[in-house]
Image (cartoon, coloured by chain):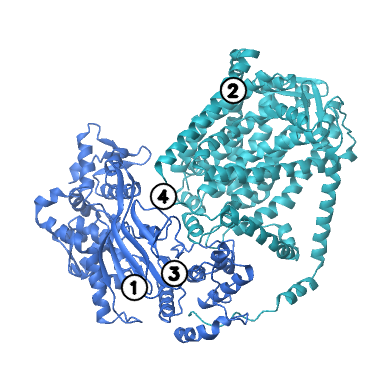
Amino acid sequence: MSFKAGGAPPRAPLSSRFAGRLSRMTWVDVVVAAAVLVLLYLVLRVGQGTTVRFSTDQSVTVDTDPSRLPYDAARSLLRMFAALAASIVFTFAYAYVAAKSRRLERILIPALDILQSVPVLGFLTVAVTGFIALFPGSMLGLECASIFAIFTSQAWNMTFGFYHSLTSLPRELDELSRSFRFTKWMRFWKVEVPAGMIGLVWNGMMSFGGGWFFLVASEAISVNNKDYALPGVGSYAGAAVTDGDLGKVGWAILTMAVMVIGVNFLFWRPLTAWAERFKNEQSEATEIQRSVVLDFLRRSNWPRLLGTSLRPVGRALGRAARVFGTDDRPLTVDPARRRTGDITFAIVAGGLILWGLVDLGFYLDDRTGLGVFGEPLVLGLVTFVRVVVLVAVATVVWVPIGVRIGFSPRLTRVAQPIVQVLASFPANFLFPIAVWFFLRTGLSIDVGGILLMALGAQWYILFNTIAGAMSIPADLREAMDDLGVRGWQRWKRLILPGIFPSYVTGGITASGGAWNASIVSEVVTFGGTTLTATGLGAYIAQATADGDFPRLIAGVAVMSLYVVGLNRLLWRRLYRLADTRYAL
Amino acid sequence: MALKALRKLRPTGLTGTTGTPTGPAAPAATPPRAADGDVLLETVGLTKSYAGADGELPVLAGIDLKVRAGEIVALLGKSGSGKSTLLRCLAGLIPTSSGTVSYRGEPLTGANPGTAMVFQTFALLPWLTVQQNVELGLEARGVPAEERARAAVQAIDLIGLDGFESAYPKELSGGMRQRVGFARALVVEPDVLMMDEPFSALDVLTAENLRGELMELWESGQFPTRAVVLVTHNIEEAVLMADRIVVLGSRPYGTIRETVEVDLDRPRDRDAPAFQDLIDRVYRIMTGRQKEARLSGRTEPADQDKRTVAGTPLPAATVDGLSGLAEMVAHRGGRCDLADLADELGLDVDDMLPQVDALDLLGFARVSGDDLVLTEAGSAFAGADVQTSKPLFARAATEVPLVKLITNSLRQRPDAAVRAGFFRDLLAHHFTSEQVERQLETATDWGRYAELYTYDADRQEYRLDEGASAKI
C-alpha cells in the first residue's frame, strides 16, 4: 500500500442523505418517539406533585390504596434520577477540582474518604430540618431532603472513581492533549470524561442500586417526634407496616421489584452496553456487554437525528468554552511564590478547621459535656460484634456457593442478574416481614438485628465471590485437575487466593453497608410493636427521633470512627495484600 | 509508484471533494514558512534531572542542539539515554532543569506551538472515528467545522487512509493506526514533526513499509512540516531516514556523544557499502566508549576492583537471554559478527545490546571491532549443562559490583538477611527510582540463578542462599 493521492469517494450531498434517512423512518422510530413522549408526560405530571403546599403542622396520612402505587412508584423514581443527576454534577465538579488543584486535593480527598464512611442515615434529620427551612410551606423541602439522602449514598463512590480516572489518565493521552494544544473544555469532554466513562457508568449503577435503600429510609421519617411522609413506594410501605397489613406490604415489595428490575433493564443495561465504546483497548474485547434495548434504539434513526441536531449546540459550547483557556502547564514555577501560596493555604484551611472544632467542642460541652462520647463508644463495640459476626457468617455461607456459581458458566448466567437485583433491592423493605417473624418465634432483636443487617449486606460478598471465581483462568483449574489437586488443598492453593481480591472488595462493601444498616436495623417497628436492640445504631436512631443533636453528633462521629478505623486497620491492608500478592 | 502519485498530488489533488483549492486549514497565527537552514528549535546547555537521594540526579546534561528547517534529525540512543526525555523537552511538555529550549528564537514557556507529536503507542482516542481523531488539532485551534473536515479528509487521503474515515481505531491494524497518528500531526502543519519511536510498536514489514512511504513523501517536497525530530533506538532506521544522527550516550547520564552527518542520497540503498559502513560507524559510537573502559578493565585486574556500582550499572538482561546469546556465539565458533547474527534472528542489533553488555560485564565475552568474542570462561559457560553452568555463572557474577555488594552485605550480617530498602537507598544516590528498580530486578535475577542469595518478595528482603558456599 502507498500514500495515495486523489479525492475521497464521491458522496451524496448532505441534504439528500438527510432526506434519505428521513424517508427510511421505520416502526422502530415511531415506537421510540412514542416512548420518549410518554416519558416526558410522566415526568411533568409527576413532577407537579412536588410543589404541593405543605406546612409542618399538617399531620401526614398516606393513602394505602394499592391503585396509588404506580403514581407513588413514579414519584420515587423521579427522586432517584434527580439524585443521580445531582451526583453526576457533583462528581464532575469535585473530582475535577481535586485532581487539578494540588492544594485543594490534600483536603478534598481525605474529606471524601471520611464522608464515605459517615453513616448517612444519621444525618437525615439535619437534612430534613434544613431543607424544610429552605423551602417554607412547600413539599419541595422534604423532596430535597430525600433526594439529598439518596445523593449522599451515591456521590462519594462515583466521585472517587472519577477522581481516580482523572489522576491515572494514560500519559500519552495527557501529552496528546498538551502537544496539540487542546482547550481545557476539549480535554475534559473529549479525553477525560470518555476515559473515565466506563468507571462512571459502572459506579453509577452500583451506587444507584445502593440508593434504593436510602429512598425507602428517607420517604417516611419522624424527626423531633413529628412524622413526615412523601408520596412514594417507601412511605406507602411504611404506612402499610404501621397498619400491620402484610398484604399491602406485599404489593409494595412487588412494585419495588418491578422498579429495580425495570430500571436495570431499560436504563443501566443499555448504558453499560453503550459504554463499551469507551474501552481504551486497542483490540476487540472478548466479553461484550449487550442490551436488547440499546440494540433497539440503535436500529432507529433517532440517535443520529438527535446527534445531528445537537451538534451545533456542542460546537457553540465548545467555542464559548474557549474562554477557559488552553490545556497547558507553565514550564517554570517560581518556587518562592509556590511556597508562600502553600503556607497561606495551610494556615487558612487549618485555621478554619480548628475554629470549627473548637466551636463544636464548646457546643457539646455546653449542652451535655464531652462525656457524651462515652456511651456511643461502648455501644459501638456491640454493633461492631454484630458486623463481625455478619461478615463471618455471610462468608462461610456465601463463598462456597459463589465459587460454585462462578465456576459454572451456565449457573452464572442465571444467578448473576438475580444477585444483582437482590443486592440493589432495599433490604429495609423486607424488615416488616422479618419483624413479624421475630414476634412469632420470639427471637431477640439483639440477635435478629444481625439478620436484618445481613439482608442487605450479604449480597455484596456473594456477588464479588462469583466475580472472583469467574476470573480464575480455566487453564489454572485444568492444571489443578491434571495434578489431582482437590478438596481442601484445592481451596487453599487455588480457589481462596484466586477469589481473594474480589472477596476483599465485597467484604469492605458489606461491612460498610452493615454499619449504615444498623441505624435502621436495631430499632424496628411492625404494627404497634417496636423492638429495640442494644447498639450504636439504635442510639443514633433514638437521638434522631428525639431531635437530640449533641447525642446525634456524638453517635455519628463515633460510628464514622469505627468505620474508618476498621477500614484502615483491616480492609486497607487486605487490599494491599490482594494487590501485591494475589493479583491474577 | 507512490512517488508518482504524490507528484500528482500538489497541483490537482488538494482540490479534493470541495472543488476549491485550499491547503490543509491553517490557523490564523501561522508564522511565515521557514526557509531551509533556519533554526527552528534550539537548546542551550539543557540539563534535566529527577529527584534522587543526594538531590538531583541528571538524566540529560549539557545538551546543545539545533534543529533546522529542511532536515530530519534522529536522536539515537539505548534505553535510559534520555532521548525521549529530550524530545519532550523540545516539545515543551516537560520543564528543563536548567538551560533553555527555544522555538524560532523564543524561549518556551509551555507546550511548543510549533510542534506536533507522533506517539510510539499511537495515542488515538478510541471513542472517536479516524476522521474525528485527525480533526482534533484543528478543533483545538478553533478552525470552523467545515474547513476542518475538508483539511482532515485531505490529510487522510495523503497518508493513504481514505476509506477508513468513519472507522474506529480498534478496527484498524497497527500500521493503519499509526497512519492516523501521522495524519493527525500533519494536518496541523507544525513546523517540526516530533516522532517518538513511531515504528517500534509495529511488526517489521509494516514498519518498513510505513517508513518508506514517509520518506517518499518527505522527498517529494509535499511534506507539510519543515523539519522532523525522530527518536529511535534502531540504528538502521536512523541511518535510513535522518540527515543528522545525534548519538546520545547513557553513562553516567545522557549527553551528546557524537553527531553524525548522513550524506547518502535518497532513496537510500541498504545494501550499498556506504550505508553499511555508516551503520557500523554509528554502532561503534554507540558502544565504543564503554567498550574501551571495559576492555582495559578486563586486562588489568587492579582496575576491576575500581568498578563501582554507580559506574557499571547492570544491563536489563535476564540470565536466560544472556546465556542464549552465549550459546549462539559458541555455535558459530566462539566468534561472530553481531550485525550478521541480529540479521539472522530478524532482530535489530540494538535489541541485543543489553545481552552483549551483560556478557561483557560478566567477563564471558568481549567486543572486538564488530565481532563478539567469547572468552574462555564464556565458552565454558555456554557449553555447560544446567548444573555446571550455575557455579560458573556464580563465579562471574560475584565480580559484578552490585551483586558483589549484595553478597558482601549479607555475609556481614549475623542473620544473613538485608532489607531491599537498604540497597535501594544506596542506589538512589546514583540512579532515579525507576532505574533503581531495574537494577535490583536484574541483580535479583542473577543472584537467584547463581544461588548466591534469595529474595523474599513479601518481606522485601535478601537472604544468603544456604547452599551457596558449598556449591562454588
Q: Is residue B4 left or right of residue B125?
A: left
What type is the residue that disc 3 sits on?
Answer: Asp
- Which chain does blue denote in the image? B
Disc 1 from disc 3: Cα separation: 17 Å
Q: Residue at x 60, y 38 (%)?
A: A461
Disc 2 from disc 1: Cα separation: 68 Å
Disc 4 from disc 1: Cα separation: 32 Å
Q: Which mark is residue B242?
A: 1
Q: Chain of mark 2?
A: A
Q: Is residue A551 visible?
A: yes
In the rendered image, residue B35, in percent from the top left (x then y), is placed at 40, 75
Secondary structure beneath dot 1 equals: loop
Q: Say above or below: A143 vs A204.
A: above
The residue wearing badge 2 is A558
What type is the residue that disc 2 sits on?
Answer: Val
Q: Are marks 4 and 1 in contact (CB under 8 Å)?
A: no
Q: Which mark is residue B191?
A: 3
Q: Which mark is residue A332?
A: 4
Disc 3 from disc 4: Cα separation: 24 Å
Which tint was used for chain A?
cyan
Q: Are marks 2 and 1 on the same chain?
A: no
Q: Dot 4 surroundings within 10 Å: few (below 14), some, or many (20 or more)?
A: few
Q: Dot 1 surroundings within 10 Å: few (below 14), some, or many (20 or more)?
A: many
Q: Is residue A221 left or right of residue A86?
A: right
Disc 4 from disc 2: Cα separation: 46 Å
What type is the residue that disc 4 sits on?
Answer: Thr
Secondary structure beneath dot 4 equals: loop
Q: Are marks 3 and 4 on the same chain?
A: no
What type is the residue that disc 1 sits on?
Answer: Ala
